[in-house]
Image (cartoon, coloured by chain):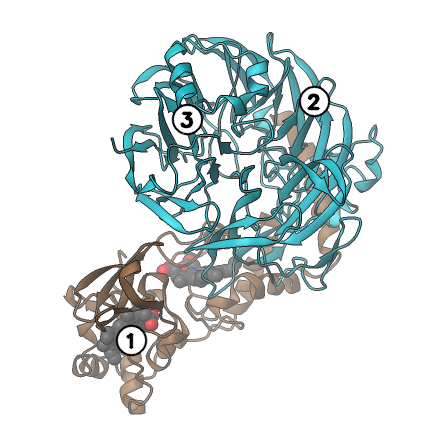
Chain colours: A cyan, B brown
């Protein structure tokens, strides 16, 4: 804790200067949470150890911040030198004293009267660089605020929200570029990932995630279907500063449940794409679910790590995909290394040696309905997994739930649902959930902690040896990272639909989570 | 805005046409009906958890447009769900619902409602159900049951109550470390605790860690009345069907 208190003492409230080098070295200052995932590698992991299996029974709320919004709380805060930056859905930004929860400034953003989003007017977080705090909005703008005051510095429009475009995820900074994803996959939007100049907000590049005529994979879409093909990019990706590659997950092809109007593999839907951060040029892609008809977006934040695999030291990327399989890829080349189911699935016989699923017959949606596991919401969803370098385990909040998938017509009109079907609960099923610990180099499940219902909250592992997570019933809990043993919980009183983080101020470790619309910060009883 | 309209409509029509591939609307409508509606309204529209659709009479709808609105938006506060099907397909369903209604069947119970009310009192149904403000609360209120449910469903509720148990009335059973067993409606549950209302309407809250066992019941907490004399059963169904208090 020595380093921690030293740094905290030097930290000057509201003088946040976060040069790019600090973001790259985020793991070396665990008292801060500098990017959406805590580091660029998507680890969603804290290096702090004060709260651990021996002390966690003394964990208690230290402060709460009532957001007083009727929108869902899905935000992951950032913490820089004692100041917490958090979004309040839809698109307000609040800076708080991270030790007391007292507000320092607030930026209010007014949305137009009629914005179009499938799943709630939410925002999931921010990025920071230098003295700028960045946010993208539900009505498809990118904003930069002054970290000291919340004053608006620049504002750039991404796309027209009236056509179903929006943005709900946290951006990330890759050197001098702000990388931003977008949403609208249920409305026939055409997916893209943007790179903006951090200083001016000018767009430097755009990579379209549906392959148009100028893309070598254009043949993967029948006719003009790429124009309304979805493949949106609505969850934050990961970044490798050495390779200068951004790894971003892409969403389902549109229309969701009827593939007739979009014959082909529909690249780059349900994929991870590796883009050169300077130019937006695609280095490689890997598609998890070709020609998807179950809404299995692959937006889950990719997790980067290095290890020896089959006798060779490699740069790796893993993802527990919404289609219920865990995947391991080489992140320099995109080479498929292995896949293994981590949750109940009834749609694929196996994943073949090229990484393509071998579909089971009778699993595609029909007018009369077909029950398939996982549900459209998947074996997991947008909320973050967590990688512990100490345990060498990937922790994932998983969903054991099937659904009946229906097919229907898919007429397109801008700003309206473009689904081509529906999905409904399997009669008589009581869906459940779990936290699972997966061994990254084999995909084996090392332990499972069952949950009553399929969760909507992410997990965070700590160097102290804990895994934090949340339930639909409102319990914020801590498990033993090595065994999955349930060690502590606190009933917050509302459904938890966000990722936990950890930070330190004055030598004291905190764990924070948004539960419902309340931000709660926990610390040890003194 | 206006400028775009012609284009939008054309694109929509072209794509929608590509879908149905020449299958007549009524047959498509039946396909959708079987997939989306039959589990509640019965495969032939005879009713179930949802109302009988073979009568051609609807509580909230008269015109096809009314039906379209109800099917699209559902009936808030009841089990009738909204639908995300595109309007073009909902029209097919409306057409099919109309064809079911053309049967003009009578949804009229065979028994005698007044005699059924006596059976209701004799069997102690009010121990668990409220009618007109009187009775117990272990089971749901029956005030407007005749509006919400088909005759087929009412019969099933009495003969095989476990065939359908609404989520709010799922049973749970817990056994404490001292061997005490508590069975009742599962009022609430999370990963750590379980709340049960027992048959005497006493509420229990258990910490799961301190229980010997606990489980959710597949059966219903309501006794089965299949062995009732046929007349009594028919009269009881007629009585339930006559309970049509509005405003629920």
Residue A373, how many percent across, how many down? 59, 58
Front residue of this view, candidates A447 and A153: A447
From the viewer's perspective, tell me whether residue A329 is left or right of residue B116: right
Q: Quadrant of the N terminus of chain A?
A: top left
Residue A21 placement (x, y as % from top left): 59, 14
Q: Are the residues flagged by discs 3 and 2 from a single subunit?
A: yes
Relative to B69, residue A334 above or below: above
Describe residue A46's horizontal placement relative to residue A41 as left or right.
left
How far, Cα to Cα, is label 1 from label 3?
A: 53 Å
Give x and y (percent) for residue A66: 30, 29
| Residue at numbered disc 1 | B222
Q: Which residue is mark 3?
A: A503
Q: Nearer the viewer, residue A461 or A356?
A: A461
Looking at the picture, tell me which residue is in the foreground, A301 or A522.
Answer: A522
The residue that mark 2 highlights is A242
Question: What is the secondary structure assignment of the residue under circle 2?
Answer: loop
Residue A257 marker = none
> Crowding at label 1, few (<14), some or many (≥20) Cα neighbours within 10 Å?
some
Q: Rounded to the nearest whole Å, what is the CA distance between mark 1 and mark 2?
A: 66 Å
Q: Residue at coordinates 56% horizontally, 43% vertically from top-left? A: A394
Q: Is residue B192 above or below residue A327?
A: below
- Mark 3 or 2, nearer chain start: 2
Q: Secondary structure at mark 1?
A: loop
């Amino acid at each position: 804790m020595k380093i921690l208190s030293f740094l905290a003492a030097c930290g000057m409230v509201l003088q946040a200067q976060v040069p790019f080098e600090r973001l790259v070295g985020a793991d070396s200052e665990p008292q801060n949470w500098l990017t959406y995932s805590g580091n660029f590698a998507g680890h969603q992991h804290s290096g702090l150890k004060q709260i651990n299996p021996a002390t966690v029974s003394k964990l208690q709320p230290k402060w709460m911040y009532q957001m007083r919004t009727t929108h869902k709380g899905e935000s992951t805060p950032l913490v820089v030198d004692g100041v917490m930056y958090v979004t309040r859905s839809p698109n307000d930004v609040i800076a708080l004293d991270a030790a007391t929860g007292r507000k320092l400034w607030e930026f209010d953003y007014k949305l137009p009267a009629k914005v179009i989003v499938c799943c709630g007017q939410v925002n999931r977080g921010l990025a920071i660089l230098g003295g700028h705090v960045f946010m993208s909005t539900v009505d498809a703008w990118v904003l930069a605020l002054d970290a000291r005051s919340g004053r608006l510095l620049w504002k750039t429009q991404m796309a027209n929200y009236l056509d179903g475009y929006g943005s709900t995820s946290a951006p990330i900074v890759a050197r001098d570029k702000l990388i931003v994803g977008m949403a609208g996959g249920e409305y026939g939007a055409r997916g893209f990932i943007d790179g903006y100049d951090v200083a001016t907000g000018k767009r430097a590049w755009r990579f379209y995630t549906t392959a148009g005529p100028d893309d070598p994979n254009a043949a993967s879409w029948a006719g003009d279907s790429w124009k309304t093909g979805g493949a949106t990019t609505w969850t934050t990706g990961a970044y490798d500063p050495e390779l200068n590659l951004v790894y971003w997950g892409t969403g389902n092809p549109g229309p969701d449940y009827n593939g007739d109007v979009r014959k082909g593999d529909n690249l780059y839907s349900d994929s991870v794409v590796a883009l050169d951060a300077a130019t937006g040029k695609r280095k490689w892609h890997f598609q998890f679910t070709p020609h998807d008809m179950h809404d299995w977006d692959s937006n889950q934040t990719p997790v980067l790590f290095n290890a020896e695999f089959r006798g060779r030291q490699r740069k790796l990327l893993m993802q527990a995909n919404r289609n219920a399989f865990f995947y391991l890829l080489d992140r320099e080349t995109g080479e498929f290394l292995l896949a293994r189911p981590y949750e109940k699935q009834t749609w694929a016989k196996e994943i073949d040696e090229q990484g393509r699923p071998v579909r089971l017959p009778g699993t595609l949606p029909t007018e009369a309905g077909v029950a398939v596991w996982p549900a459209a919401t998947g074996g997991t969803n947008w909320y973050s997994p967590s990688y512990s370098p100490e345990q060498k385990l990937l922790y994932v909040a998983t969903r054991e739930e099937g659904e009946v998938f229906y097919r229907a017509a898919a007429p397109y009109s801008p700003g309206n649902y473009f689904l081509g079907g529906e999905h409904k609960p399997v009669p008589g099923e009581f869906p459940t959930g779990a936290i699972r610990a997966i061994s990254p180099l084999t995909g084996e499940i090392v332990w499972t902690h069952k949950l009553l219902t399929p969760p909507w909250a992410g997990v965070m592992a700590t160097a102290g040896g804990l895994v934090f997570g949340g339930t639909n019933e409102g319990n914020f809990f801590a498990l033993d990272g090595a065994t999955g043993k349930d060690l502590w919980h606190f009933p917050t009183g509302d459904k938890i639909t966000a990722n936990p983080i950890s930070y330190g101020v004055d030598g004291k470790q905190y764990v924070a989570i948004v539960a419902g619309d309340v931000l709660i910060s926990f610390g040890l009883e003194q | 805005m206006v400028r775009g309209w012609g284009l939008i409509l054309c694109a929509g029509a072209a794509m929608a046409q590509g879908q149905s591939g020449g299958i007549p609307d009524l047959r498509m409508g039946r396909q959708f009906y079987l997939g989306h509606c039959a589990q509640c309204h019965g495969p032939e529209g005879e009713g179930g958890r949802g109302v009988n659709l073979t009568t051609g009479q609807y509580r909230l709808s008269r015109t096809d447009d009314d039906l379209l609105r109800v099917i699209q938006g559902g009936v808030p506060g009841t089990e009738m769900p909204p639908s995300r099907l595109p309007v073009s397909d909902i029209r097919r369903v409306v057409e099919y619902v109309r064809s079911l209604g053309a049967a003009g069947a009578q949804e009229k119970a065979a028994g005698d409602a007044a005699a059924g009310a006596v059976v209701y009192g004799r069997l102690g149904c009010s121990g668990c159900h409220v009618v007109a403000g009187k009775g117990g609360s272990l089971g749901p209120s029956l005030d407007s049951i005749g509006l919400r449910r088909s005759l087929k469903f009412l019969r099933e509720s009495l003969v095989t109550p476990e065939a359908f148990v609404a989520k709010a009335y799922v049973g749970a059973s817990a056994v404490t470390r001292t061997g005490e067993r508590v069975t009742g409606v599962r009022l609430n549950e999370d990963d750590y605790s379980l709340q049960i209302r027992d048959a005497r309407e006493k509420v229990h809250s258990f910490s799961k860690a301190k229980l010997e066992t606990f489980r959710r019941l597949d059966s219903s907490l309501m006794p089965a009345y299949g062995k009732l004399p046929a007349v009594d059963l028919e009269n009881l169904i007629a009585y339930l069907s006559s309970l049509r208090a509005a405003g629920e």
